[in-house]
Image (tube, grey):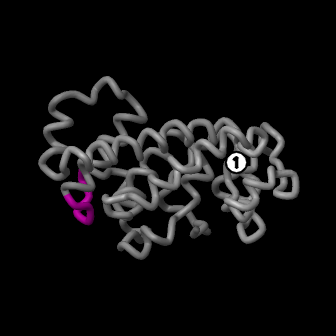
């Protein structure tokens, strides 16, 4: 059960309804907006940034999804782990690749660029002060500086909002494997993944 009341779309601010069209989204797709709708003024400020992270993305969708899922594991954001985005699937993400996230450094189906990005996201989620010159030098082998900035913004979004989502404990609509208390689910080896 969620720890805060989720606002149903009929209680949302009219501008949010127009921008987000919740009537065509499942509860899972409505996600955090069901909570954020309590503060529509803040959501209206956040939407352009969140939208730009998606529409102005230059990094591959598959790479961003791999980083998102690895961060979700460390955040223990159950809804984040249970979701797969269709743009990443269209870009070559499949469950075999997701299973590689259990030990990404050893995976033979991840590119060196993906491994570097995943490592960066993992460090940001677990021990950000270990991100030093060596980590940035490794990133520079695969990415331009604007791409590194983009990767950092994406990963920071995942870390911050994923941790917040984990504390809200919105699990009602998730597959059973992600609903339990006390266990430590993973985004790999899970049945009934939700595609968005």
SS at badge 1: loop
Q: Which residue is mark 1?
A: 180
112 or 45, nearer to the observer? 45
In percent of the image, x 39 and y 51: which residue is there? Answer: 67
Residue 43 position in % (x across, y down): 66, 44
Secondary structure that dominates the magenta span: loop
In percent of the image, x 25 and y 47: which residue is there? Answer: 146
Residue 13 position in % (x across, y down): 80, 50
54 or 86, nearer to the observer? 54
| In this picture, residue 160 sits left or right of residue 168 | left
Instruction: Say whether residue 130 is magenta.
Output: no
> From the image, which quarter does the C terminus lie in?
bottom right
Q: What span is colored magenta in the figure?
A: 105-111
88 or 45, nearer to the observer? 45
Residue 33 position in % (x across, y down): 70, 50
Where residue 145 sits, quadrant-wise, is: top left
> From the image, which quarter does the N terminus lie in?
top right
In percent of the image, x 65 and y 46: which residue is there? Answer: 44
Query: Which residue is situated farthest in the top direction here?
Result: 129
| In this picture, residue 138 sits left or right of residue 49 | left
Query: Which residue is situated farthest in the bottom direction here?
Result: 90
């Amino acid at each position: 059960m969620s720890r805060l009341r989720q606002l149903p779309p009929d209680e949302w601010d009219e501008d949010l309804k127009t921008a987000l069209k919740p009537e065509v989204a499942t509860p899972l797709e409505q996600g955090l907006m069901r909570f954020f709708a309590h503060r529509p003024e803040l959501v209206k400020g956040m939407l352009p940034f969140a939208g730009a992270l998606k529409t102005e993305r230059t990094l591959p969708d598959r790479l961003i999804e791999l980083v998102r899922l690895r961060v979700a594991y460390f955040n223990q954001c159950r809804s984040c782990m249970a979701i797969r985005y269709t743009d990443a699937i269209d870009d070559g993400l499949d469950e075999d690749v997701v299973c590689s996230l259990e030990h990404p450094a050893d995976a033979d189906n991840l590119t060196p660029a993906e491994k570097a990005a995943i490592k960066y996201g993992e460090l940001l989620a677990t021990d950000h002060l270990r991100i030093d010159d060596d980590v940035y030098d490794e990133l520079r082998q695969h990415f331009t500086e604007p791409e590194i900035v983009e990767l950092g913004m994406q990963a920071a979004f995942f870390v911050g909002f994923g941790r917040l989502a984990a504390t809200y404990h919105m699990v009602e609509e998730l597959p059973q494997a992600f609903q339990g208390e006390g266990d430590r689910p993973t985004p790999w080896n899970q049945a009934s993944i939700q595609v968005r």
